[in-house]
Image (cartoon, rainbow, N blue to C red):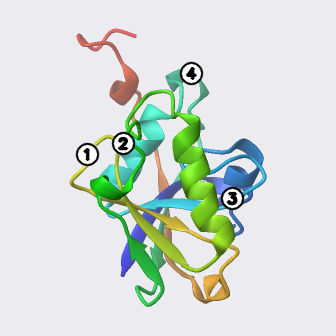
Amino acid sequence: MTVYRLSKKQFASDLTGEGARLFGGRWNHIHTGCLYTSASRALALLEFSVNVNRILAPKSLCIVTLEISEKNMLKLDIRDLPGNWQEVPAPGSTRDFGTGLLQEARYSVIAIPSVIVPDEYNYLLNPLHKDHAKLRITAVRELDYDGRIKAGPTGQK
């Protein structure tokens, strides 16, 4: 299965989950690593965009394409998630939920609905799982972040 993630150029080949470990995310607490990936390039861009300030968007981004195995995947449905899973900012319940699954290390991949487009999936790749070393990067392409994505409704900044 192919998944995608956006990354600063210097971290494009880093599959350790260190960024998420250092800063946390919707589905993980600080000190628990994971790689956030998406089912499509467009969803990866949307997820990145809602989580970055336009002013702070890195100039040197890459879209990373990875090939993952579905062998040890847990696919979650909205019914499986905490009731407040779509709140912004992300509630502690989602970090508790995801961190528990990641630390359990039973699954190499956790498929989870996107808050932005709930019918689409993001994929949490678990560096604690024994199969994590089997991940393969199949492509790394530079991406110029289009500032219009974060511009005001009339194109004004």
Q: Which residue is mark 3?
A: 11
Q: What amino acid is at disc 1?
A: Val
Q: Secondary structure at mark 3?
A: helix
Name the residue rendered at 43%, 90% in the picture. 71
Amino acid type of the residue that numbered disc 2 sits on in the rendered structure: Leu
**Given the image, on which type of amino acid does mark 3 rest?**
Phe
Q: Which is nearer the eye, 52 or 27? A: 27
Mark 4: amino acid: Ile
Query: Gap in Å between the C-alphas at discs 1 and 2?
Result: 9 Å
Q: Is residue 52 left or right of residue 104?
A: left
Disc 2, SS: helix
Pick whichever of labels 2 and 4 is earlier in the sequence.
2
Residue on which the image places disc 4: 55
Q: Foreground mark, 3 or 1?
A: 1
Q: Residue 123's image quarter?
A: bottom left
Q: Position of residue 93 (x, y in %)?
A: 54, 41
Q: The residue tagged with tag 1: helix, strand or loop?
A: loop
Nearer the camera: disc 2 or disc 4: 2
Neighbour class for label 1 at 10 Å: few (<14), some, many (≥20)? few
Q: Locate the N terminus by quadrant.
A: bottom left
Disc ID at residue 117: 1
Question: Cβ–Cβ below 8 Å for labels 2 and 4?
Answer: no
According to the picture, the residue beneath numbered tag 2 turns out to be: 46
